[in-house]
Image (cartoon, helix red, strand yellow):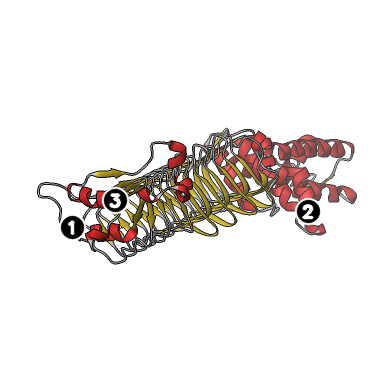
């Protein structure tokens, strides 16, 4: 480049470069220096992009003992800043600058890049390696920010950045690697899709207070995202469009505290097969219009939906199918509007609230060790009977087992009795009749004292009948004194003898009565014994 062709502002920059000094072309008037007013800036604030390129790729040697750098503020950059495949060993720091064309940094090797409070019609940095920080704080970028395949050894700071590419990719960062934190907070906004699939972040991902908008598709597409520490989508975080974290991995905790997600009629949060090393907080005002799905997720700690509001009227509002978590806190601010699917989830501690139970549940295959609060069996049965799939035996068995583990055997038996009764409703007429008899006589074996009551009634009935109609004597030579009470008791007892049954034989209709007492006594006696020893078949 011919130095004689440089304009005065370009010459100032040229002379400042060897020492790494800053050149400030701004006027000092904040309203006029706003990059939105760049069209009104005069020639004294214009710098050609080719001058920046020349300095960055080695057109001028650093001054001995100094660190050379391009540091420029308040300039309008014209032409194309094209550093594609370049090897840049000096820092680039532009503040409050406006670009006429999108910079091209694709597959370049950069030292560090600071584009703070700049205005850019796009930024293409696909495959770029930055040995240091990429600092875009406060910049406005339209037309898309491309960081796919980029590698940043320091921080990626997009605090306060405004991205705009409606209907397209506002941020394209597939397979991005950042070894430290990523900041998308302090007023970060996007109009268009934010893409982070397959990205790897060595620190934290901070989207605190971010506002994402892409109503026609995903607002945040971060499937297979790998974050070594925490992910913050809280502090006023909002998303119009789906937030997709399917197959993502979070080394710390994931916070959606107070977040508002909206994707009416679709999935608002897709976190299927997510892995979180500590806790997930979708709590304290978390609101989702659309489905929330954690199907297949694995959470080492707590999954909290305390004081959340979920609405997806026409389908599954909350899917926890196959979730594995140490604790599930399902105490929402109001009943979930839609179906809550907990089928085949494995939870150590399930904490819920009857006041917030949804009208529709799916519970088949749900495994849990402890319920808090346990509630009464009658209350928990109302919970089970909200299952949209109808009767299934496993939820009853699991609930009864939990009650028994808590030492509440009576509640456990009550649940199993309810299981038999609810099963009866699914059977044919003949099975229903048999079921009614089993229920009325012995409570399906879970009411042994009911069977004992029938035995006492049977004994009283036989005593009265045979007191009025004494049976015939079988052997006049050897016979005990007839006693109607002991005779009936001898008929009822399935084993042993009191000497009465073998000595007397009723005739006619009374023989039928005696045989009925024998058969009924056998069934009722076995039922009582089985109920006491809990050996009666549960089927």
Q: Earlier in the sequence, mark 2 or mark 1?
A: 1
Give me the C-alpha separation between circle 2 and circle 3.
Answer: 103 Å
Image quarter (top left, top right, bottom left or bottom right) of the N terminus: bottom left
Where's residue 249, x and y in %?
A: 41, 53
Give me the C-alpha separation between circle 2 and circle 1.
Answer: 99 Å
Q: Which marked residue is nearer to the observer: mark 2 or mark 1?
A: 1
Where's residue 7, x and y in %?
A: 30, 54
Image point 75% across, 50% down: which residue?
A: 519
Residue 8 marker? 3
Q: Earlier in the sequence, mark 3 or mark 1?
A: 3
- In the image: residue 351, left or right of residue 121: right
Callout 3 crowding tier (Cα within 10 Å): few <14, some 14–19, many ≥20 = some
What residue would you read off at disc 1?
A: 60
The foreground one among 296 and 401 is 296
Q: Which marked residue is nearer to the observer: mark 2 or mark 3?
A: 3
Where's residue 132, x and y in %?
A: 26, 50
What residue would you read off at disc 2?
A: 434
């Amino acid at each position: 480049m011919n130095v004689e062709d440089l304009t005065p502002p370009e010459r100032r920059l040229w002379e400042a470069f060897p020492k790494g000094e800053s050149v400030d072309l701004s006027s000092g008037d904040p309203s006029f220096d706003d990059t939105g007013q760049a069209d009104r800036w005069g020639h004294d604030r214009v710098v050609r992009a080719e001058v920046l390129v020349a300095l960055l790729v080695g057109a001028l040697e650093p001054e001995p003992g100094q660190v050379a750098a391009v540091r420029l503020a308040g300039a309008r950059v014209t032409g194309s800043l094209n550093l594609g495949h370049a090897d840049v060993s000096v820092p680039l720091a532009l503040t409050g600058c406006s670009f006429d064309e999108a910079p091209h940094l694709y597959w370049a090797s950069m030292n560090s890049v600071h584009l703070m409070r700049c205005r850019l019609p796009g930024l293409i940095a696909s495959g770029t390696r930055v040995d240091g920080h990429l600092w875009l704080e406060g910049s406005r970028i339209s037309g898309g920010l491309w960081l796919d395949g980029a590698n940043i050894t320091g921080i990626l700071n997009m605090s306060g950045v405004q991205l705009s590419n409606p209907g397209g990719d506002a941020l394209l960062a597939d397979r991005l690697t950042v070894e430290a934190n990523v900041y998308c907070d302090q007023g970060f906004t996007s109009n268009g899709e934010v893409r982070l699939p397959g990205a790897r972040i060595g620190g934290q991902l901070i989207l605190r207070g971010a506002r994402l908008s892409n109503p026609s598709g995903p607002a945040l597409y971060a499937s297979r995202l790998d974050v070594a520490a925490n992910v913050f989508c809280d502090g006023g975080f909002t998303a119009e469009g789906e937030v997709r974290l399917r197959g993502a991995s979070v080394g710390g905790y994931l916070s959606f505290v107070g977040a508002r997600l909206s994707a009416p009629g679709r999935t608002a949060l897709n976190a299927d097969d997510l892995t979180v090393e500590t806790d997930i907080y979708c709590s304290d005002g978390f609101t989702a219009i659309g489905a929330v799905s954690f199907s297949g997720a694995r959470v080492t700690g707590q999954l909290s939906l305390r004081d959340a509001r979920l609405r997806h009227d026409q389908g599954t509002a909350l899917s926890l199918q196959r979730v594995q978590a140490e604790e599930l806190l399902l105490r929402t601010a109001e009943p979930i509007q839609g179906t809550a699917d907990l089928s085949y989830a494995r939870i150590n501690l399930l904490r819920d609230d009857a006041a917030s139970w949804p009208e529709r549940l799916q519970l088949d295959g749900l495994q849990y060790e402890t319920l808090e609060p346990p509630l009464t069996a009658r209350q928990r049965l109302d919970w089970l009977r909200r299952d949209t799939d109808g009767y299934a035996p496993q939820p009853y068995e699991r609930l009864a087992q939990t009650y028994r583990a808590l030492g509440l055997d009576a509640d456990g038996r009550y649940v199993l009795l309810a299981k038999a009764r609810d099963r009866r409703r699914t059977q044919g007429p003949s099975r229903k009749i048999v079921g009614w008899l089993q229920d009325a006589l012995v409570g399906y074996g879970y009411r042994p004292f009911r069977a004992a009551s029938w035995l006492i009634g049977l004994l009283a009935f036989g005593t009265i009948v045979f007191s009025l109609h004494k049976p015939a004597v079988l052997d006049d030579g050897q016979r005990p004194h007839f006693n109607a009470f002991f005779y009936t008791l001898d008929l009822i007892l399935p084993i042993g003898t009191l000497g009465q049954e073998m000595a007397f034989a009723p005739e006619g209709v009374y023989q039928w009565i005696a045989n009925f007492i024998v058969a009924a006594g056998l069934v009722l006696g076995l039922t009582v014994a089985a109920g006491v020893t809990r050996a009666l078949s549960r089927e």
